[in-house]
Image (cartoon, rainbow, N blue to C red):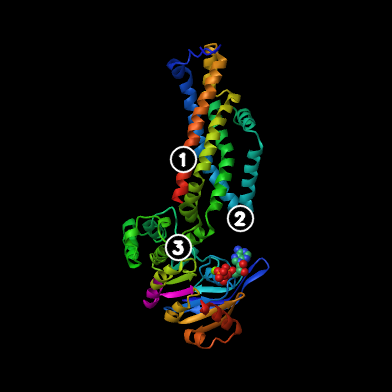
């Protein structure tokens, strides 16, 4: 007991019955949206830097549109529109995974674009001069360097992504936050449950940020 | 081997190259010099189509560089190039720098590429550094690796763009030595450089550029003996003071 707060319900049963499932989904959503977002985002960045308007323009429009809409609205609209388009619901979880991947790609794309531009033009010349094609030069020379230069920023974006996954409450998907909410209702302790939720999110994000900071200094030394 | 015919190039409305014509025969060493901004780098980059040009023609070993349908990656793989700032790939080890294009472009086996790479590292005196990364080497060492990287492709000619001008003075000679050796073995070379000692030693011809034009194109003896243009005389007197 701390004041009027009763934290006694926080035990292993709570974790295994309510939180594990939600935590698992939050992590899954974060990892898939990160991987998919970086791949799709890199493709968008390459389109924008291609110098060909028919590739650059649609990519730029996509990125700028996504970046101008609140995420929660994208989540909601995708969830509501898909049943109208395909005739049935795809489920909140799958809908969230697709939405996050598409949305995060816009942000990862801006990071990768800066990363690609951070690689000296001479590196591209050197790749071409050896007989590498455009694709090979990008894949083997430019993107690995861009990725390495941007790793801390990419990871920071991923931490933000992890925090944002809690927005899937809007469509009722069962994530970590939802786990706390349901547990709070179940034990009739909603305030304590949300308090614990805040602590858990804080601890996860704070430790990840510290890891990124360490990484940043190590990368600075390698370069 | 390399034929440059009436090449002109513009950046927007600014003309960088004006009707440049010259040629490099097989086994010939040609030095290109001229003041900063005169278009030397641009000209040498036109040779392997790293820069496009609007007029004229460049022919390498019978293949027109600018023609539609030319397999540029294939052509470039046969033309070695060394840059002012080395441009080693910093995320790859020295030996990986040497093997990457051999494997990806020439389809050599990893083993054959490695053997070739190690042999070339030995040639430039850097065998001990095979597994280091470019950032761990001095500028002179990096440039020698860059030369070895180009040679690993068994090029039919080599292009150099001011290979020593980013180096500390004490490292210039280790790079020039490798280039002199290469020249003496009969490599076809086109070198942008202000190292007149190098030119005197191994060049067959010297080209002097100014404001995008080839002002002088003379045999070495003629060039150093009696440069005909006022601009070349001025330029020579400036750089020979150093
Ligand atoms: N991408 C570009 N866009 C516009 N102008 C350019 C570009 N690249 C080069 N130039 C201009 O073209 C001219 C020739 O450049 P270039 O690099 O070929 O000169 P250079 O003879 O190699 O000089 P340096 O000795 O300084 O290397 C210069 O006036 C330069 O400012
Ligand atoms: Mg130059």
Above or below, comparing residue A42 to residue B184 in the picture: above
* Among numbered discs 3 and 1, the one appearing first in the sequence: 3
Which residue position is annotated with label 1?
A214
- Labels 3 and 2 within one chain: yes
Q: Secondary structure at mark 3?
A: loop
The circle on residue A130 is 3
* Ligand 1 contact, mark 1 (Cβ < 8 Å): no
Magenta range: B178-191
Q: Residue at x 43, y 70 (%)?
A: B172
Query: Disc 3 and disc 2: Cα gap in Å?
Result: 23 Å
- Where residue A72 sits in the image (x, y, percent)? 62, 30
Q: Residues within 10 Å of mark 1 (few under 14, many from 20)?
A: few
Above or below, comparing residue A30 to residue B226 in the picture: above
Is residue B182 found inside the magenta-colored segment of the image?
yes
Q: Is residue B66 visible?
A: no
Q: Residues within 10 Å of mark 3 (few under 14, many from 20)?
A: many
Query: Disc 3 and disc 1: Cα gap in Å?
Result: 36 Å
- Where residue B59 sits in the image (x, y, percent)? 51, 74
Which residue position is annotated with label 2?
A51
Write down which quadrant ligand 2 falls in: bottom right
- Where residue B99 sits in the image (x, y, percent)? 38, 59
Q: Chain of mark 1?
A: A
Q: Is residue A2 visible?
A: yes
- Where residue B19 sits in the image (x, y, percent)? 61, 77
* Among numbered discs 3 and 2, the one appearing first in the sequence: 2
């Amino acid at each position: 007991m701390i004041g009027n707060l009763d934290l006694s319900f926080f035990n292993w049963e709570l974790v295994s019955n309510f939180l594990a499932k939600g935590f698992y989904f939050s992590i899954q959503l974060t990892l898939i949206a990160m991987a998919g977002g970086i791949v799709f985002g890199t493709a968008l960045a390459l389109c924008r830097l291609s110098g060909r308007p028919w590739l650059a323009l649609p990519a730029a429009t996509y990125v700028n549109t996504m970046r101008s809409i609140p995420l929660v609205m994208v989540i909601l609209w995708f969830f509501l529109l898909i049943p109208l388009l395909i005739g049935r619901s795809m489920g909140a979880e799958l809908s969230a995974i697709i939405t996050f991947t598409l949305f995060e790609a816009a942000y990862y794309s801006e990071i990768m674009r800066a990363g690609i531009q951070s690689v000296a033009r001479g590196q591209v010349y050197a790749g071409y001069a050896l007989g590498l094609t455009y694709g090979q030069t990008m894949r083997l020379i430019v993107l690995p360097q861009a990725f390495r230069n941007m790793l801390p920023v990419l990871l920071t974006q991923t931490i933000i992504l992890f925090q944002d996954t809690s927005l899937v409450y809007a469509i009722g998907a069962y994530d970590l936050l939802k786990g706390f909410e349901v547990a709070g209702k179940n034990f009739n302790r909603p305030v304590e449950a949300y308090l614990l939720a805040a602590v858990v999110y804080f601890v996860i994000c704070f430790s990840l940020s510290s890891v990124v900071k360490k990484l940043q200094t190590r990368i600075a030394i390698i370069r | 081997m390399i034929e440059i015919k009436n090449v002109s190039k513009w950046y927007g409305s600014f003309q960088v190259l004006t009707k440049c014509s010259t040629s490099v025969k097989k086994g010939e060493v040609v030095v290109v010099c001229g003041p900063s901004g005169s278009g030397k780098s641009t000209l040498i980059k036109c040779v392997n189509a790293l820069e496009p040009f609007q007029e004229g023609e460049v022919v390498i070993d019978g293949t027109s560089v600018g023609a539609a349908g030319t397999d540029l990656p294939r052509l470039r793989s046969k033309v070695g190039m060394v840059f002012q700032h080395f441009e080693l790939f910093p995320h790859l080890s020295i030996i990986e720098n040497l093997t990457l294009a051999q494997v990806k472009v020439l389809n050599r086996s990893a083993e054959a590429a490695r053997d070739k790479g190690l042999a070339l590292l030995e040639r430039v005196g850097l065998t001990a550094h095979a597994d280091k990364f470019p950032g761990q080497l001095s500028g002179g060492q990096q440039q020698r690796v860059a030369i070895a990287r180009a040679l690993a492709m068994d090029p039919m000619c080599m292009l150099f763009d001011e290979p020593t001008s980013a180096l500390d003075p004490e490292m210039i000679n280790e790079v020039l030595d490798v280039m002199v050796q290469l020249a003496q073995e009969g490599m076809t070379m086109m070198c942008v450089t202000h190292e007149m000692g190098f030119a005197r030693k191994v060049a067959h011809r010297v080209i002097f550029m100014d404001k995008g034009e080839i002002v002088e194109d003379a045999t070495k003896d003629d060039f150093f003996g009696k440069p005909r243009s006022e601009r070349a005389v001025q330029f020579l007197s400036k750089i020979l003071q150093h």
